[in-house]
Every structure is written in structure tokens, then in C-alpha cells.
Amino acid sequence: MNESTNKVLPGLPGSAAKMRPDVSPTVSATASPATSLRSPAAVSLASRLLMVSVLLLLLIAPFVLPQALVNAAIQMLIAALFATAFNVLAGQGGMLSFGHAAYFGIGAFATLHAMNALGGAGLLPTPLLPIFGALGGCLLGLVAGWFSTQRSGVYFSMITLALAELLHALAPHLTSVFGGEAGVSSMRMPAWGLSFGEPMHVYYLTLAWVLASLGALFFFTRTPLGRLTLGLRENAMRLKFLGYDVHAARVMVFMISASFAGVAGGLLAMNNEAGNYVLFDVRLSSEVVLNAYIGGTGVFFGPALGAAVMTFFGYAVSDLTRSWLLYQGLIFVVVMMFMPNGLSGVVLWWQRSQRSSAVLARYAAGWSLGALACAAAVVFSVELLQRVLGSDYQSQLVDAQPWPAITLFGRDWLPGAVSTWLLPLLLLVAGGLILNRVTRAWDALNEEEAA
Amino acid sequence: MSAVNSIHPVSTSPAALTLRNVSKSFGEAHIIRGVDLELQRGERHAFIGPNGAGKSTLFHLISGNFKPSAGEILLGELPIGGLSPERINRMGLARSFQITNIFPRLSVFENLRLGVMQRFGMQYTLWRPISQYRKVTALAEQLLEQVRLVRHRDTLGGELSYSEQRSLEIGMTLASDPKVLLLDEPMAGMSREETDYTAELLRELSVGRSLMIVEHDMDVVFSLCDRISVLVYGQVVATGTPEEIRNNAQVQEAYLGKEVAA
């Protein structure tokens, strides 16, 4: 277990706290099952190169990254797989699950019990045990999917939420299965000449499973059932009149999604060698939704990108500030408002644009600059306010005395002074102006062309 | 599985589709009031009638979207009244919709391929990529040509013009190679040229199948169909050849009047 992670997700005890991930640029372009991307050969070559470089980076990561980052990378990989599995159901199948923690958690417990029961020896040595995560997710997915897919839309979402909450509420009482409050723990036993005691072994084990799973899920999008999944999202009613059993198809898709969520849970269990009922927390269910949408559900690798970025963000920021969940929420809101197709939507925008990369880069830089200025204003205000309103600071206040200075970003700031608040205000105005101007120029450019 | 164009079957025995005293009520509203009809094999049969006569409701009953309140519907000799739409489709009856009903964010090709796939029972296939099923691809391409959407192969369904979506709708309905084809106002919104082409296409594709069509374009109805039924307030007031219908006084009065007399 790695201690630094426990701090990262305040409020999330133990194992669940480790869900953060990533592999940054995994994403890129490649396949958008939703809207087939007709890209010239150059673009396809570029995406391939990007894929290969990401792969290489992932392969050499443990040799070049410090220990803490390797641990973070494991979390990123797991979150990326979880988000991709979730997206099979949500993005491809049009079924927004609010309870995916259930399948992730069940996968984790199934794997832990398998580790304890099999001891990592025999036909199923340690590296193969996440298969039990898949089995657990698959079985629970069959049952939960059979019920929840009787309905669609909001009702579907509510049923998945309720089922996951049911599990979350029951789990602490089912001591023999979920180990009560303490949870279940296990040990990674050596196998295939590897100790699995070093983070590097765990990293490669995780990487292998995540890559194989992503590969399988990508393959799935190319199969008849995978194509049918898109039909479920687009117009399930029409499918009935084409002769398809829509309920059965939905259950299948649900099971596939739940199985791979279970693998992700199993990998987390192997990584932590422990798990408790907090794995079923609604927090995990909502995080995977946010990650997938931030990354973009319309592109196969979008959710993985989102999960990787957000996990890394959590890793990097959660040690720095207590407000990081607020920032996470803000990022989600801003992405949904201004980039509804998520981060991967930006990649597609770039690829599909007729304009030269230089032009695109100039505008992208302009928008980034404006966004950064606004972000700096928000961060400054939030951090200052958080300190001013904190009980530590409030207890230092003396009536009729000016409020003492607060140290932030290496400088002292007087919360009572107008000049202190002028800084974020100026940043915000400047950022807003930049964004406004760049957007106008961009619109003008497009109109010119259209005319 | 016969190819898209098969031979004209000359079979007399049971009708392709039989309706016996079929009724449908929604609460107090009696929308369909005892319809009897036999759709012969190879026949092209039109339903005409004023708006609200129950033409679309009748299609919903036959295709499994609604359950009949009373009466019997037979596909060949098998009762299908109240069965699910997917079962009815797999028994060989496909329908199109009055309001365009496609997969808007999938390509035109994909829309058709989803229709073709089912014919081969590939609903649960996940060990081979779809692209390896050459026959599926070939049939989808063939449909693409038939409904004249080749140049829109990779366009998203939702981005097609309205009349192109109508063509796509027809293509999807044909994809499962049905024995009985129900088309609900297939030409609505099409230009004259598109309508003529589509009528010709239907003439061609309905060989070896039975076609039931609801259409407001009387030129199409009278030139394409072997028989016509006039539906008024949920009842068939007349059934006959185009000539008989044209000369039927009751029909003139109830519905046709201006449109055809002209």
C-alpha cells in the first residue's frame, strides 16, 4: 500500500482512496465508434505514432519515474480501465450507470478472496487472479443488468444507483464476505519467478491487464454486438422492429461493462492487498462518471484519458490543497459547458479542422492563456477564502484589530485590503477579455471563410 | 434466406397476412373497429383514408407495437397478434415508420448494416469483427445502391435531408429481407422524381413479397398497388382494385372526392 495515496483523496479511506490514475496521453484519437472518423492518412499515421509513443512511455515509466509516481501511474491505469469499461455502457450503449462502484467493488472482493483461497499457486497463479474480478463483475452485472435494463433513461440510472447503494449498505453487515468494517486483506504471492513485492512488478502486472482489457474492449466495438450497442444508444425502439431482442442485448452489454469494471477492481485489490466496503461508495460511482465525461464519451480512449488526467490531478493537487474536490467539480462544470465532447473532443477538433496546425495552435494557446488567467484568479480566491474562513484563522481574530496577513504562494496578503482582491479581479477580467477576443477572432475567421 | 430479389411465388393457399375482426380501443376511444382483410401473397395493397382513420394504428397492431383489443392477426398461418415486435420481425414482417425512425448518429451504411446483421442471427456475436462478414457488408452495400444513398455512405443518418432519410428508412425496412413489408407513408416529403424512383423501387422489390402501404400520394397508390382498402373511422369501407375504388361512390364521398376525381 502506498501511504501517499491515502492522503490524496481525503475522505476516502484506505483502498478506495487510491483510485487515481493515469496515463496521460493515452488517448488520442483513434477510434470513435460513435461517429466514424474519416481522417486522411496523415492523421491516422499521427494517431498511430501517438499510440505507439504512449505505449513506449508506459513501458519505460517505472525506470524513469520516482516511486511515488509509479504508484500514481498504477492508479491512473486502473482508473483508465474502469472509465473505459463504464463507457461501454454509458457512452456506447447509452445507459448511464450511477452505480458502477458495485461492479468495481465486487471485482476487488472476488480477487481478494481468490488470492486468499488459491494462494497464488496452481493453475491460477497471482498474475491471473484479476480474472476473478471479471467473473464477479460479470455475475453481478448479469443480475443487476437484468433488472436495471428493464427500464431506460433516468429510471435505468436510478435503479443502478439504488442497487449500488443497497450493496454499500449491506456490505458492512455481511462480515463473512466483505469482512465488515475492517474489510478483507490478502497477500500477493510470488509466481512465475516474480515476487510481486516491488512496485515495478505490480506496475507491469497492472499495465498488462489494462492494455489487454482495453484491447479487448476496443475489439468489442468492432464486433456485431459492439455495433448493436451503438444502436441501443441511438434508437432502441427501432432495433426491436429490426428483429433484435433489446433487453437481452442490453443485459449483455451491461455484463461486459461490469466484467471489465470488475477487472479494474481486481487490479486495485491486488495493488492494495486489501479492500473494504468503502469500495462500494457512491463517490467511486460518481467519479467514474465525471472522469468519463471529462475525457469525452464519444471517443474510445476519451474516458481513459479523462480518468488518467483526473487521477493525476488528484495525485498532484490533493496534497497541496484541501479544496481539490472543489477544483475537480469546477473542472467538470467548465468542461461540460465549454467542451461538451470532453478532452478528447479537442483532439478530434484539431484533427478534423481544415486549418493548419499553426493557426490551430495559435488559437489554442490564446484560449489556454485566457483560461489559465481565470483559473489563477479562481484558485487564488478559493485558497485565500478557505484560509480566511478556516477556524484556525478565525480564532486569531481580535475585535477592532485589522485582520492579520495570510501567507499564500510565498507572499503575505491582507484579507482586509482591497488591493489583495484586486489581483484576482484583474486576472479574471484579463482572462475573460483574452477568451472573448480569441473567440471573436475565431468566429470571424470562420465567417470569413463561409462568406 | 432469399436474396433481395427473388422469384415471384405462385402460391394460392393461405394469405400472406390475414386480419380477422381486429379492433383496438384506447379507453373509450375505439380507433380500429373490426377490420377484416386478406393480404395475398405477392400483392401490393394500399391503405388510404382521411387523417385519424387509424391507418398507422393498424400498422402498429400488425407490427407488434400495440396489442389488439380483439380479433386475430395471422402471418401466413401463424397468429402474431400481441407478439413482440422483434418476434414478428423475425417471422418475416418488417415495417417502416411514418415519422422517420433511424439511428441518427450512425452512418448511413451502419444504419443499413444493423438491419442486415439481424438476418444472420449475429445479435450476440463478439468474437469476430463485423468487417469479416463479407456477406453482411455486400448486402448493406447493395441496399445502399438500391435506395440511392451510395454517396452518403458515411454521412450520419441524422445529417441526411428529409427525403433521403425516408429512403434510408425504406432501406432499413428491407434489410431483414421480409416476406411482408409494411410501409407507412414512405414517400412523404419526397420530390416528384424521388417519389417516382421510389415507386419503381418498391415495384421491383415487392416482387416475391407482399406489400402493405399507407400513402397519401394517390398517383403512387393507384399505379403501384393491386388493391386498395379505404379506412374511415377505424373501419374498412371498401376494398378493391384501383378501378373499383375510383368508381366507388361511397369512397368518393368519404374521402377521395377532390383528389382523385381531378
Image: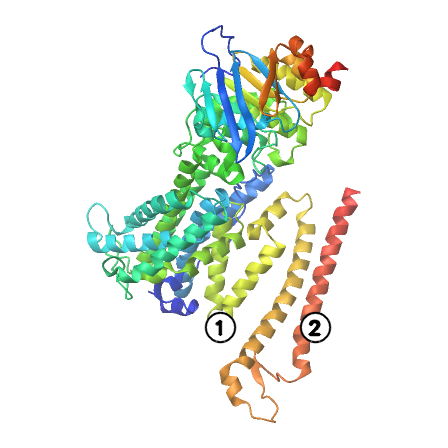
Q: Is residue A329 above or below residue B84?
A: below
Name the residue located 58 percent from the left edge and 15 percent from the top edge.
Answer: B45
The mark total stands at 2
> How far apart, in angstroms, are the residues tagged by discs 1 and 2?
25 Å
- How would you rate the neighbour count of disc 1 (Cα within 10 Å): few for under 14, some for 14-19, many for 20 or more? some
Q: Position of residue A81 (x, y in %)?
A: 42, 50
Report the side of B73 relative to B247 (left or right). Answer: left
Report the side of A168 relative to A449 (left or right). Answer: left
Q: Position of residue A140 (x, y in %)?
A: 33, 48
Q: Which chain is mark 2 on?
A: A
Q: Is residue B195 above or below residue A410?
A: above
Q: Position of residue A323 (x, y in %)?
A: 51, 71
Q: Is residue B89 visible?
A: no
Assess whether mark 2 and mark 1 are in contact (beta carbons under 8 angstroms). Answer: no
- Mark 1 and mark 2 on one chain: yes
- Front one among A357 and A408: A408
Q: Position of residue B184 (x, y in %)?
A: 60, 25
Marked residue nearer the N-terminal end (1 or 2): 1
Q: Is residue A71 above or below residue B159?
A: below
Color scheme of the displayed model: rainbow
Helix, strand or loop at disc 1?
loop
Q: Which chain is mark 1 on?
A: A
Helix, strand or loop at disc 2?
helix
Which mark is on residue B64?
none
Q: Is residue A57 visible?
A: yes
- How would you rate the neighbour count of disc 2 (Cα within 10 Å): few for under 14, some for 14-19, many for 20 or more? some
Which mark is on residue A426?
2
Q: Amino acid at mark 1?
A: Arg
Name the residue located 48 percent from the left edge and 12 percent from the top edge.
Answer: B15
To which residue does mark 1 refer? A322
